[in-house]
Image (tube, rainbow, N blue to C red):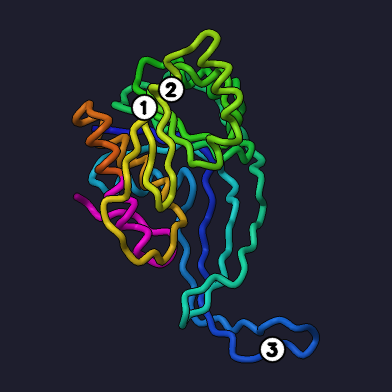
Amino acid sequence: MKILVIGDSCKDTYEYGTCERMCPEAPVPVFQPTKSKSNMGMAGNVAANVRSLGYDCDIITNKNTIEKIRYVDDRTHQMIIRVDKHDYVENKYEHDEEKLKGYDGIIISDYDKGFLNVGDLKLILETDTPTFLQTNKLLDDWCVKADFIKLNEYEYEKTKHLLDNLYYNNFPGIDSKLIVTLGGKGCRFQNKTYPVFKKVEVRDVSGAGDTFLAAFTIHYLKNNNPDTSIKFAQECSVEVIQKHGVEVVTQK
């Protein structure tokens, strides 16, 4: 099985250190770095999870790198501050239908950082290959050809009024495509709630949505069963939130 991921990527950097004294110039702690760790994030993290699950994956993404730097207390693992550098990409997606051929599935991981516009998304969704969409853009009729659309609760509430318009006007089937993740409450699909199957110590939720999207896609393409695919994706997400930093799921 071979997957193509398309979307915005970033560099996720964790700067670990200690805060043992206050700054004399202002009432803020002084951060002393001890170690640093970096991984690819956003669409890059989706692709990394697909590969970690044991499948071939190509990625079409931005060349210049957005960077998210998280400063974390090394003893408590509490994030102190996050600094975002270059929060918008400069180069754009260039559509080439030939580059979309030869894949079992296409994952669109659109963080709305400028790499993909709505016109690009419509062209990608015209393909005959199964497509799995995650986007921070407001949804409208451009999204109806996606096989599945994964949103978190905030993204869903932000675009719910447009989804209602689609449902009551021309596209009543839009509800059957939506998977809404609910954080610690699980997720919702076709009016069914899937609770989290076990309680764990949550260390870092960064990238958990990417893991869910990658795992759901892989499992669905193998089994054609959204119910078991959601449960598998939840299992994978629960694994990564128990790790520090943006980490990928282990092969299952």
Q: Give the position of the N terminus as an image quadrant.
A: top left
Above-or-below relation of 31 to 115: below
Judged left or right of residue 251, residue 93 is: right
Place residue 217 in its image quadrant: top left
Judged left or right of residue 47, residue 36 is: right
Amino acid beneath label 3:
Met
- Residue under pointer 3: 22
Q: What kind of element bears circle 3?
A: strand
- Residue under pointer 2: 175
> Quick one: label 1 or label 2, which is nearer the N terminus?
2
* Mark 1 and mark 3 residues within 8 Å of each other at the beta carbon: no
For label 1, the crowd category at 10 Å Cα-Cα, with few meaning under 14, some 14 to 19 and many 20 or more, is few
> Quick one: label 2 or label 3, which is nearer the N terminus?
3
For label 3, the crowd category at 10 Å Cα-Cα, with few meaning under 14, some 14 to 19 and many 20 or more, is few
Q: Position of residue 56 (x, y in %)?
A: 28, 39
* Mark 1 and mark 2 residues within 8 Å of each other at the beta carbon: yes
Region rendered in magenta: 234-252
* Mark 2 and mark 3 residues within 8 Å of each other at the beta carbon: no
**Marks 1/2: CA distance?**
7 Å
**Marks 1/3: CA distance?**
52 Å
Amino acid beneath label 1:
Gln
Considering depth in this image, is 233 or 180 the residue closer to the camera? 180
- Residue under pointer 1: 190
Q: Residue furthest right?
A: 25
